[in-house]
Amino acid sequence: MDGLFGVTSDRSDAAPHPARPRILLVEDNYANRDVLTRRLQRHGFDVCVAVDGPSGVALAHEANPDVILMDVALGAMDGWQATRLIKSNPGTAHIPIIALTAHALATDRDKSVAVGCADFDTKPVDLSRLIRKIRACLVHPATTQ
């Protein structure tokens, strides 16, 4: 982890294998990051990780991921604020974002869609459901809302 920027990477500095879609996971909880990163990697994804909203926004621009998994409860800058920033930047606006939250409230889903998320999922993560949503974003990034 780079303490200055709060960014960790579970991949080498080499470019990802073209057959491995790149996922940016923005998650502040270490255990959630660790488990989800390992599970996604086993399913063929290249995963990079940000530990808070500001580093997630920065890494979205730097890593140009295929999909972003955005925790909504991140602290000072929540996932919805980070999503607004990513979606307002022409260089990152095209990246589909799936909001992740422990709350299954309709208002959370509505707010996630309103700020530009392509989809919404709850924690604890049902991996097969989440992978279906990720794959839908990869196939139809502009139409998954």
Image: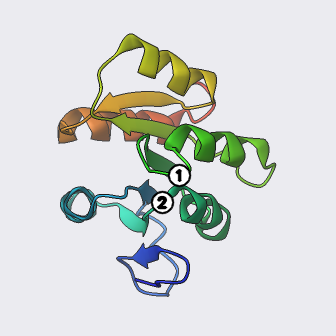
**Mark 2 neighbour density, 10 Å: few (under 14) some (14–19) many (20 or more):** many
Residue at image coords 40%, 83%: 1
**100 or 12: nearer the viewer:** 100
Q: Which mark is on residue 76?
A: 1
**145 or 83: nearer the viewer:** 83
**52 or 66: nearer the viewer:** 52
Residue 61 horizontal/vertical position (percent): 67, 63
Residue 94 horizontal/vertical position (percent): 69, 43
Residue at image coords 51%, 43%: 79
- Outermost front residue: 76
Residue behind mark 2: 52
| Looking at the image, residue 5 lies above or below residue 87 | below
**Mark 1 neighbour density, 10 Å: few (under 14) some (14–19) many (20 or more):** few
93 displayed left or right of 99: right
Q: Are marks 1 and 2 in contact (CB under 8 Å)?
A: yes
Residue at image coords 67%, 39%: 84
Q: CA distance from mark 1 to mark 2?
A: 9 Å
138 displayed left or right of 89: left
Q: Quadrant of the C terminus?
A: top right
Name which residue type carries label 2: Asp
**126 or 30: nearer the viewer:** 30
